[in-house]
Image (tube, rainbow, N blue to C red):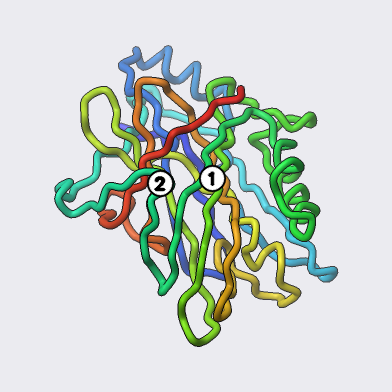
Amino acid sequence: MKIIWRAGMKVYKTLPCFFLMAALCGCTTQSIEDAKAIEETKSYAYRYEYETDSAREAVTKIYNEKPTYDENEQVEEYQQGPLSNKTSMMKFIKMNETFEYYDCEFTVKEAVATRNYNYAKEIIDDKYIDEVMKYFKKQIAYDVDGNLKEDDNRTVWIKIHMKYNGNTSKNVNMCSGFVVKKDDGKLYPFGVQLFVDREERFTSSKDNSIAYCMDINPEDEYDMWIGFEAPVVNSWTYYLEGSFGYIFQPTGYTGYLIELDIEDRG
């Protein structure tokens, strides 16, 4: 039996972090012939590598794989399982509630979903917008007009207020993810993190910038935006993982879960 992953895996060459957040699809049962006919018409971009060229521009390398099957193989989609830890190991909070992590105070202020990435021009600081737009224009999930090719998917923009209370400068990993409570009442890791507007890939001139990581200094206090790609389903409850920097098995997450009130602007 061959298992098909519908979500790509992002591999950042400068970071030994394989952070797989599967954009989940419903599991279906198909005949062998139907499944082969559908799957063999598609190519899956299964790896992205963000590198830096000689001009220090971010370069995305995409490796496409077209599935092939033997006559006797069966095909079914892989569905990520629910979180393996008990809900008692999670810290559930709401938007506009402040929590502490990395010697910082974090507050999730806004959550907006759009189909077009040009919304970034309305919210991202002028210091970062050019690099953020360059990033989006290289993503194969969007068409030339900036719209997501998958009708049900959205770019979800999360505004977070951060206040650093530490005494020394340091580099922090803002890698995060979505967790959703589906109609069965279980919690599932979900979606794909795209960017943090202040991360090294957009702000640093060094060759080995690391995805989702950023420098913070004593007395820093500001708003930042984190972007995700995910389907938005009205009957599901969405959470942001607030224990940033978790890079291990998605189903093993424990820590802060911030319930999101997402405004879907279509």
Quickly name the residue at label 1.
158
Q: Residue at x 27, y 47 (%)?
A: 92
**Residue highlighted by disc 2:** 240
**Secondary structure of residue under mark 1:** strand
In this view of the protein, which residue sits in the foreground, 57 or 98?
98
The image shows residue 216 at horizontal and vertical percentages of: 57, 75
The answer to whether one can see residue 65 in this image is no
Q: Give the quarter of the image for residue 145.
A: top right
| Residue at 32% from the left image edge and 23% from the top image edge | 27
Q: Amino acid at mark 1?
A: Ile
Q: Residue at x 55, y 26 (%)?
A: 264
Give the total number of marks visible in the rendering. Answer: 2
Quadrant location of the N terminus in the rendered image = top left
Measured as percent of width and height from the top left, residue 147 is found at 70, 28
Label 1 vs label 2: CA separation? 9 Å
The furthest residue to the bottom: 168
Q: Residue at x 53, y 57 (%)?
A: 161
At mark 2, the secondary structure is strand
Residue 117 in the figure: left or right of residue 155: right
Image quarter of residue 186: top left
Q: Residues within 10 Å of mark 1 (few under 14, many from 20)?
A: many
**Residue 131 at x, y = what percent?**
76, 56
Q: Report whether 220 appears left or right of 4.
A: right
- 153 left or right, relative to 4: right
Tags 1 and 2 touching, CB below 8 Å? yes
